[in-house]
Amino acid sequence: MVQLGYGRSQVQVLAIDGGGVRGIFAAALLAGLEEDLGRPVVEMFDLVVGTSTGGIIALGLGAGLSPAAIVDFYVTQMGAIFRNPVGWRNVRQLFVAKYRPAPLEAALCQVFGETLLGESRVPLIIPSYNLGDNDVYLLKTPDHQRLRRDHKVPMWVAAMATTAAPTFFPAFRLPGDHVRLIDGGVWANNPAMVGVTEAVSMFGRPLDEIRLLSVGTTTSTRTRRSRLDNAGLLRWIRSPNVVELLLNGQSTGAFTQVQHLIGVEDARRLNPPAPDELVALDTCDASDLIAKAAHHSRIFCPEFQAVFGSHVPNPYVPFHGPSARQDGHAHHP
């Protein structure tokens, strides 16, 4: 069994929420922390878990991209990925997926190339959902002997699988296996509990040795009026009431469970409120999100330094794939 951080008192997990283009906030927040501390954020964590847009950020960190480079990716590519001339795609969304996947795939292929999941510099978990078998689907780096398959998956494929949000993009068929995958946000938009579970089950660490940082993508300040109390299908189904409640409910529940398991002092979350114009999944004011991230990273940096900043994980060497040791065993000196 992998013993990441062996000989150290803690295993540290970074969990990044889904949220569409609001991933700009999460990436910019990490960029701000990195700039202040003068050290790559990814070097302070033993495991990174990311869902949907958080999955893109996690994969980017695993591929060696800086958070600042990931912010640049979002800012330069979101116009092409979410192109919606004169708003006609809002009508299209009533009948089929709002966006075609080709622009997203092209952007991801451009940034990741043919880099494989097994070539990540840090252990990763990327949640998705198997639509055909109605089951969760986790794409993982080979940080355990039995994880033999996913290391062959290109990072751009993992990113497509975790971001195929229903009504926004069609389901993504995994090349070769043809498994129908959709956005992991349908069950783990906040993947904090996924990260803690992995640290216990695969890394073999007790709960009192786990620290977790959960990074959100901002939350809506919208209040729900009492007219929803007895509303029917038409009023509830109007976006974003149902979607927001499901995502926020799962996110809050997951983090609360993590706090109960590992303790409030070892579970930190940063997910500030933002006005409606900043919290859409497919459109935003990038400058305002970056500014909000700069503000909150400035305030949070001392706490981050005190809780997470001194940790140095042992080098990660996978069990399988191009970077594995020749003897087939992971090595953590």
Image: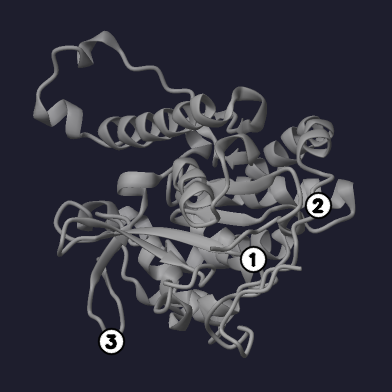
Q: Is residue 180 left or right of residue 279?
A: left
Taking depth in this image into account, of 6 and 315 the one nearest to the observer is 6
Pointer 2 residue: 34
Q: Is residue 251 visible?
A: yes
Q: Is residue 226 left or right of residue 191?
A: left
Q: Amino acid at mark 1?
A: Val
Q: Which label belongs to residue 176?
A: 3
**Where, quadrant-wise, is the C terminus in this rendering?**
bottom right
Element at label 2: helix
Marks 1 and 3, the one that precedes in the sequence: 1
Q: Which label belongs to residue 262?
A: none
Label 3 to label 2, Cα distance in Å? 38 Å
Q: Is residue 283 visible?
A: no
Marks 3 and 2, the one that precedes in the sequence: 2
Q: Where on the picture, by quarter, is residue 290?
A: top right
Element at label 1: loop
Q: Amino acid at mark 2?
A: Glu
Pointer 1 residue: 122
